[in-house]
């Protein structure tokens, strides 16, 4: 952390990172190739790309759950050594502990990190109030709606005060209306936390609504195809922003870029399944 | 009992009357249908029991089946009555029952604790699992009851040999379920706990064990029965007390009623244990989605 304070290095840097997997039949598969990205402190970056192109892999490299096969990942100028406590992660699927009540889910992080019990619960109640879930403390996840579960997840993540927030298509399972509400909720939490965010999604509009910068990836193996600055002023209102002319203009520009990759990815999938069939 | 005749068409009871229009009427109709269905189920349950026991009694008393081998329910009941009120020829029934229970419970507790610990240890450690899995398979392929004479030889006629047999009956069932449960722990949950800050034992305690719990409980249900089997087989082979001994002595004197009476005693105990276990499980698993009638 000391290193973080005394230099102005970006929150996250991926420098020429390559990540290869071994498939179950022993073949090597490249998910990321020469991938370079940098996220400034307090910056909100969205990563879009065709499905299955390796977007989630980038996040795993940053968390330390996976190590790069080549290249370098740096957090606040330092190397990644295992799972970094400054990181928060929002999962695509439900990652709440089903056997814990809402408040026990939120309090998990601080308790794991050795915060005294009373203090942890105090802070959990505070965070539940911030995501408008006061009064639901003793319920179990299965008793909540999808949107409420996502809000519990956000509270569970934000309570640790992450400096880096990684989000892997967190809202993709929600219906459209709920998703827009969650966007506003997230923007509000983020604006107060000053965290650096990497938000992976396949939904271009979601990316433009939320981010300062959008990275478009090529279809697998993924590399950065292009980077777009989103100059729509903040604070943004997720439910209205999509009708602004500037929003539409940006989304047309990026889509024309992304479409080529999506088509290429679909072609490749088809030829692969054709090969398997033959 | 008037609607016994309805039970010939049980498939039609769920249909609501076509003229029900208001919510209340529809709900009332559904409630009536549910009651009718429940009654039908109970009726058939008792019917089958009565037919079975009555048939047995009748066939036995009319000498169609040989009473010498098959006894008859009334004899078994009166034998149980004598056992309960006056004790068996070998002493108090309660003492025999207690001995068998002591052996089963000890074997069950020790076996399941060992099974859970071993399952979690091997489930969490790939290396250990790869090394030991072959031996576990080997030992598991031995039919457990053949160990009874060996254990009696080693540990003698007393408690220890039966506990040992119960232990081996229970251990492998619980072990393999605990192992499987640990392996099936959701990867997302594990990753989430790690990112939230869980390390080592915290991870095992807060994610691995809770998610293996339903697997472990499923095995505990079965394995208490196995523990009883272990104790009784051990008592068959050599013992001074226990329900297995009672069966063995009844067998020696061609006392069919005695054998069936001992079986009934065991059945009652096993059912009671099963009931207790379900209660404990329901308490521990209150986080699970509730059965339908509680849903909202």
Image (cartoon, coloured by chain):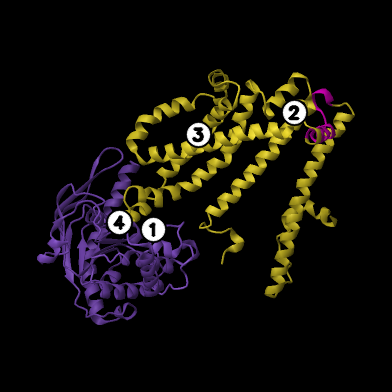
Chain colours: A purple, B yellow
**Mark earlier in primary sequence (4, 3):** 3
Numbered badge on residue B91: 2
Instruction: Report in which chain the residue with disc 3 lies.
Output: B
Q: CA distance from mark 4 to mark 3?
A: 34 Å
| Residue on which the image places disc 1 | A95
Q: CA distance from mark 1 to mark 4?
A: 11 Å
How would you classify the magenta stretch by its main secondary structure? Answer: helix
Q: Is residue B67 magenta?
A: yes
Q: Look at the image and give the residue range highlighted in magenta.
A: B65-83
Is mark 3 in CB contact (under 8 Å) with mark 1? no
Instruction: Report in which chain the residue with disc 4 lies.
Output: B
In this view, the residue in front, A146 or B99, is B99
Circles 2 and 4 on the same chain:
yes
Instruction: Report in which chain the residue with disc 2 lies.
Output: B
Circles 4 and 3 on the same chain:
yes
Between disc 1 and disc 2, the foreground one is 2
């Amino acid at each position: 952390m000391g290193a973080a304070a005394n230099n102005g290095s970006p929150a996250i840097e991926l420098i020429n990172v390559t990540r290869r997997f071994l498939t179950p039949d022993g073949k090597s598969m490249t998910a990321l190739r020469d991938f370079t990205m940098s996220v400034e402190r307090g910056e909100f970056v969205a990563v879009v790309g065709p499905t299955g192109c390796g977007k989630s892999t980038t996040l795993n490299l940053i968390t330390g759950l996976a190590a790069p096969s080549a290249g370098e990942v740096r957090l606040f100028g330092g190397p990644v050594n295992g799972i970094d406590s400054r990181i928060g992660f929002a999962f695509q699927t439900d990652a709440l502990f089903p056997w814990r009540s809402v408040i026990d889910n939120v309090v998990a992080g601080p308790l794991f990190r050795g915060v005294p019990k009373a203090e942890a619960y105090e802070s959990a109640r505070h965070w539940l109030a911030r995501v408008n879930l006061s009064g639901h403390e003793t319920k179990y996840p299965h008793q909540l709606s999808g949107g409420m579960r996502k809000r519990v997840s956000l509270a569970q993540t934000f309570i640790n005060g992450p400096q880096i927030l990684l989000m892997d298509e967190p809202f993709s399972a929600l219906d459209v209306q709920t998703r827009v509400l969650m966007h506003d909720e997230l923007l509000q939490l983020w604006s107060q936390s000053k965290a650096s965010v990497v938000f992976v999604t396949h939904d271009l509009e979601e990316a433009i609504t939320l981010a300062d910068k959008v990275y478009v990836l090529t279809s697998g193996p993924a590399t950065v195809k292009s980077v777009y600055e989103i100059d729509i002023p903040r604070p943004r209102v997720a439910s209205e922003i999509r009708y602004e002319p500037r929003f539409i203009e940006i989304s047309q520009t990026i889509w024309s870029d992304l479409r080529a990759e999506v088509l290429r990815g679909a072609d490749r999938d088809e030829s692969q399944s054709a090969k398997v069939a033959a | 009992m008037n609607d016994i005749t309805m039970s010939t068409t049980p498939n039609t009871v769920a249909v609501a009357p076509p003229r029900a229009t208001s919510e209340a009427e529809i709900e009332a109709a559904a409630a009536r249908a549910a009651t009718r269905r429940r009654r039908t189920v109970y009726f058939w349950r008792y019917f089958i029991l009565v037919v079975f026991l009555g048939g047995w009694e009748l066939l036995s008393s009319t000498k169609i089946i040989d009473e010498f081998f098959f006894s008859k329910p009334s004899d078994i009941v009166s034998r149980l009555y004598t056992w309960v009120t006056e004790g068996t020829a070998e002493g108090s029934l309660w003492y025999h029952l207690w001995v068998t229970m002591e052996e089963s419970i000890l074997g069950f507790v020790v076996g399941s604790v060992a099974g859970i610990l071993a399952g979690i240890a091997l489930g969490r450690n790939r290396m250990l699992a790869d090394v030991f899995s072959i031996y576990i398979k080997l030992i598991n392929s031995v039919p457990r009851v053949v160990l009874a004479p060996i254990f009696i030889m080693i540990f003698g006629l007393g408690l220890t040999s039966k506990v040992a047999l119960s232990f081996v009956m229970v251990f492998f069932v619980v072990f393999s379920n605990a192992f499987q449960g640990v392996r099936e722990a959701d990867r997302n949950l594990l990753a989430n706990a790690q990112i939230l800050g869980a390390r080592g034992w915290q991870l095992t305690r807060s994610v691995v064990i809770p998610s293996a719990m339903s697997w472990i409980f499923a095995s505990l249900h079965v394995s208490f029965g196995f523990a009883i089997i272990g104790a009784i087989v051990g008592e068959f082979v050599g013992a001074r007390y226990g329900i297995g001994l009672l069966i063995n002595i009844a067998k020696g004197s061609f006392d069919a009623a005695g054998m069936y009476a001992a079986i009934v005693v065991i059945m009652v105990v096993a059912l009671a244990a099963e009931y207790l276990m379900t209660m404990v499980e329901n308490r521990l698993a209150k986080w699970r989605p509730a059965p339908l009638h509680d849903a909202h």
